Amino acid sequence: MASHHHAGAAHSGGPGAAETARLLREAALEVSRCAVEIRGAAARAGAVLGSSPLARSSLRHPRTGLAAQWSLVRALTSASGLGFALSGGDGVLRRVGQAGELCGRESLANRVAVTSLRMRAAAVLAEHPELGRDPGMRRLMDAVTGDRDVEALRALRALLRDKGAERAMSTVAPLFAELSAIRALLDENPLNDEVGWQIATGEALHADPWLGISARHLAAFDAGEGAAVAVPLDDEERRSLATEGSLMGFLGNIDLLRTDGRILIQDVRGPDGVVRHVLQAPGMAPGKPRNDSPQDFVGAWSNLFDPESPYTRGILLAIDEYGLPAGAEIALVGHSEGGIALMNLAQNSAFCRRFRVTHMVAVGSPIDNKKPADPRTWVASVTNQHDLVPTLDGRGAGSGSVFTPHPDWYEVDYIDSSHEFPLCHSLGKYMGNLEAELAGARRDIDKALTPYRGPVLRSQVYQLKDRANPPQGYPLMAVPVAPVATSAGPVEVPVRYYDSTAAVAFFAVDPDRVAGLLSDASWMSPSRVGRRVLVALSAYEHRCVSLGPYNELSLAVLVNDLWRPRAHDVLRELLRRADTRRTGRQVTALAVTTPEAEAAGRELWGQPATTALVDVRLTGNRLHAVLSAPAPGPGGEAGGPLLSLTGDLGPYVPAPHVDSVLYGRTADATLRSMVHCAGRQRFHAAPRLRLRCPTGPGEEEPLVRQARALGLDGARPLCVLSAPVYQARRGAGAPLPR
């Protein structure tokens, strides 16, 4: 089924408006052909003028040669000849021509091409007389066609102010391509002339029409290799998916997916019993460009010019993961940017050799500058004349059926009562038009999609991204793991902390008070700052960890080299990597919230872990770390606080993360474990925290008992290291013979 269809609501220009518009477009086509011939003649004349044979001939025969050169110069620069048409030459002549254009000189070919574009604009005005009656639009057209850029900018600003952005953009949309091309041909910028010619002659665009930036440079902003990940639908979305294949069903699925980077692939059993496949792709998301998804304005612009865009590459990866068999029949249905990306796929000859692309349906998509690689592919394009997006390929309402590059496509170019952009670009609006005003076109497209009219057998949604995401925690967590048996079940080692919050408060304590904590390891030498010993109280909220989420509070004494302790060991050792460091922290008490964490602490790291009620929160610059007594009764709720470290952390400076070495004790050995960490850390030199562990209940809790013994009740820390986003991995403890 191959036909050309131009439909829409009745034009408001009267019964003769359509015939007038047709005659104007036919005349515009003839004038554009004349412009091309004139441009070709100027290019040939410029090539002769700049050729070496003519220069050598002029030297040999100066009387006739110089006269011939002068005649060519006059023809290429005189207003009574070809205008200022030197830009059609090569080398020096081309540079002279561009310099002349910068000075406001014009060629005859450009003026004739502008005449063709003005006739196309007149055809649009014949069908849309309301545009000609609009004073703001009339002022804009007069300024653009008169090559008055400043006045055109003022007219556009006035249009935006009077009508608002939505109404102004939809008002300009029917004439956007023609106005863009006229401005490109008349302005003093020689870089966008070629784009103006491409619009005037109906060729594919290779740059933007306003500044002349090439497609290659524009595509560079949409970098990425593309990625696709299978994702599930929620229950409501799953219930809303179409269960039967049809045009409105496929468009409804696309509307359901929204514009968050998802596409849908479905298997449909046709009336003949053959299973075929339908790929459905939404359009771009409004707002600023997003680096995580190809469905944005930059992605749409890249798709328009570059067939190898991240969106298209992501779709190919999704198809590979879905497992379509070679030679399978597939239909492509897309809206806006999705239609562009799918047409890029349809014009990929390698893809068409691998699969049989039977149908391509694009709604609100600028695809006129593309062509399927398989000539058997049936293509339908549905566009609203007040929708600005479909005009980005350079073919607007002024082109009509005369300038169509694809006479065998089924095209629906219509107008409706809604002239507001971007409302008229929304898929919901297009679906409403297809249900009501365009019922005939809907039936025609459904008839063409008959092989896909049947029950849906399988549906799979894929999340597309500009780039593939690395594994969670990469590269810190990219290490081999092995299960280790504990009393609470197997634990993967190293233990990986993917998403945590950390705060470490350092206190200066009397050495005599610390001696009691290290009495079972008398050979351990605590680190000193002056005459005081450093003690660290660490608080962690582990939200995502390989052994399950939990909170912890730990008390540790900073110790020197276990064999050859020296003064100020800790400060020197901070410059070493953890695997070559001799100092560390001897954990003397550990409170955790889960049995799995308690078993890992005791059996993997030799730390005196207990299960307790611990609440740790780091909100902004405020820390809340509380160890509570269990409330009476079977509920297990928290009772009164036994130990708390709360308050404002104070000002901070960024600090690098330093890996840690922790020591624990078993009955016959010291266990040394390393904590490798990543994330941003903050150093608070003047924290306003205060530790509270009043006397009374809680003597059975080792952490509380030790904090009281160290005299920390009411103490303020010397400094605090905090990390709102903290990642770490911790291996099993290595036994040391001490």
Image: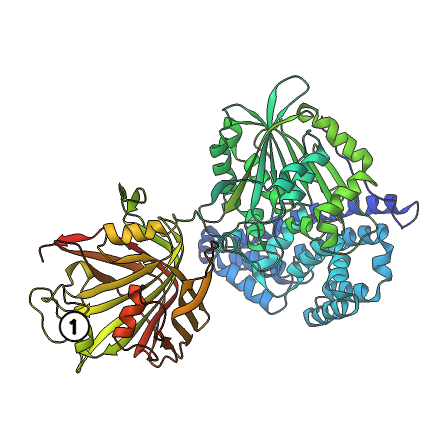
How far from the left and from the top, in percent, is residue 55?
A: 46, 56
159 relative to 208 in the view: left or right: right
| Residue positioned 62% across, 58% down in the render | 75
96 relative to 699 in the view: left or right: right
Q: What residue type is labelled 1?
A: Ala
Residue 3 in view in this figure: no
How far from the left and from the top, in percent, is residue 183?
A: 67, 61
Compared with 301, 513 (above or below) is: below
Compared with 487, 538 (above or below) is: below
Q: In which quarter of the image is residue 566?
A: bottom left
310 relative to 362 in the view: left or right: left
Q: In which quarter of the image is residue 243?
A: top right
| Residue positioned 25% across, 53% down in the render | 602
How far from the left and from the top, in percent, is residue 296?
A: 57, 53
Give whichever of 149, 488 is nearer the camera: 488
Q: Mark 1 points at which residue?
A: 515
Q: Name the quadrant of the C terminus.
A: bottom left
465 relative to 35 in the view: left or right: left
Crowding at dot 1, Cα within 10 Å, few <14 / some 14-19 / many 20+, comes out as some
* Residue at disc 1, secondary structure: helix
Give whichever of 486, 38 is nearer the camera: 486
How far from the left and from the top, in percent, is residue 399?
A: 74, 46
Residue that extends furthest to the top in the rendered view of this protein: 272
Compared with 482, 130 (above or below) is: below
Residue 446 in view in this figure: yes
Q: Name the quadrant of the N terminus.
A: top right
